[in-house]
Amino acid sequence: MSKVIETTGKTVEDAVNAALEELGADIGDVEVTVLEEGSKGLFGIGSKQARVEVRLKMDLAGEGVRFLESVFEKMNVDVDIESYEDEDSILLQVSGKDSGIIIGRRGETLDALQYLTSLVVNKKSGRYKRLTIDIENYRKKREETLVRLAKRLADKVVKYRRNVSLEPMNPYERRIIHSTLQHNEYVETYSVGEDPNRKVVITLKQAYSDR
């Protein structure tokens, strides 16, 4: 968990500065909660010091990078990792000559690494952050491939009036298929089976199949 301290001062600013000095941090590295504003009192009588709680923000993206680096070292792969973090999500972008090894068959190795890294990062966080690992833009390229596949197979279902079952996919890839065809006039989708063999089925909509 992140480090939290309480400090006091004549003003809120003084109390915060005292906390920053103790933590060895900058204002951008912390979250501040004002517990008491403080007051001067009357002629100095009854004055109260300001009191604040200062929490050192965790470097969650850094935690993810360090975990991946330790895994890649054991795998003996040579890659670089860049991290991007906002309020709700973390993206770890991997590149390098050995990056293809990490993707695995249909992205299975990549998905496993993403799952484990997310566990490590969110175990140390006060709230859930969505973590994504991408390698040489694999996820974007895979998404584009799946969108084209969904549209092509939907046309096939309409032409031959027969259901089409896709190969087993992970939840992320199944969502892409469902999302691509959710507004299609002629077909609809549903999933069958249990993970890791769960797959998407494309079928004619009832209204169209009765024509």
Image (cartoon, rainbow, N blue to C red):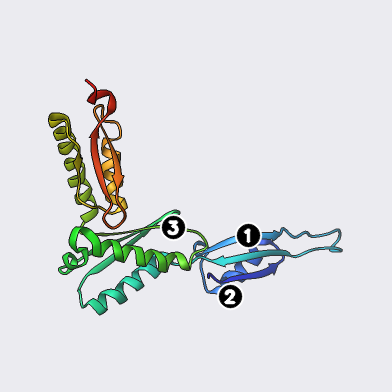
User: The disc labelled 1 sits on which kind of residue?
Assistant: Thr
Q: Quadrant of residue 12?
A: bottom right
Instruction: Identify the residue at the far front of this view.
Output: 210
Q: Report how far apart the C-alphas of labels 2 and 1 lie in the structure.
A: 16 Å
Q: Residues within 10 Å of mark 3 (few under 14, many from 20)?
A: some
Instruction: Identify the residue at the far top of this view.
Output: 211
Q: Nearer the viewer, residue 57 or 184?
A: 184
Side of 93 where 141 appears, left or right: left
The image's mark for residue 129 is 3
Residue drawn 14% across the image and 34% down it: 156
Q: Which residue position holds label 2? A: 22
Q: Which residue position holds label 1? A: 33
Q: Nearer the viewer, residue 24 or 105?
A: 105
Q: Secondary structure at mark 3?
A: loop
User: The disc labelled 2 sits on which kind of residue?
Assistant: Glu
Marked residue nearer the N-terminal end (3 or 2): 2
Marked residue nearer the N-terminal end (1 or 3): 1
Q: Residues within 10 Å of mark 1 (few under 14, many from 20)?
A: some
Side of 28 where 174 appears, left or right: left
Residue drawn 72% across the image and 58% down it: 37
Q: Secondary structure at mark 2?
A: helix
Q: Report how far apart the C-alphas of labels 3 and 2 lie in the structure.
A: 28 Å
Residue drawn 87% across the image and 63% down it: 45
User: The disc labelled 3 sits on which kind of residue?
Assistant: Lys
Residue drawn 79% across the image and 60% down it: 40
Residue 198 position in % (x across, y down): 28, 52
Side of 139 where 129 appears, left or right: right
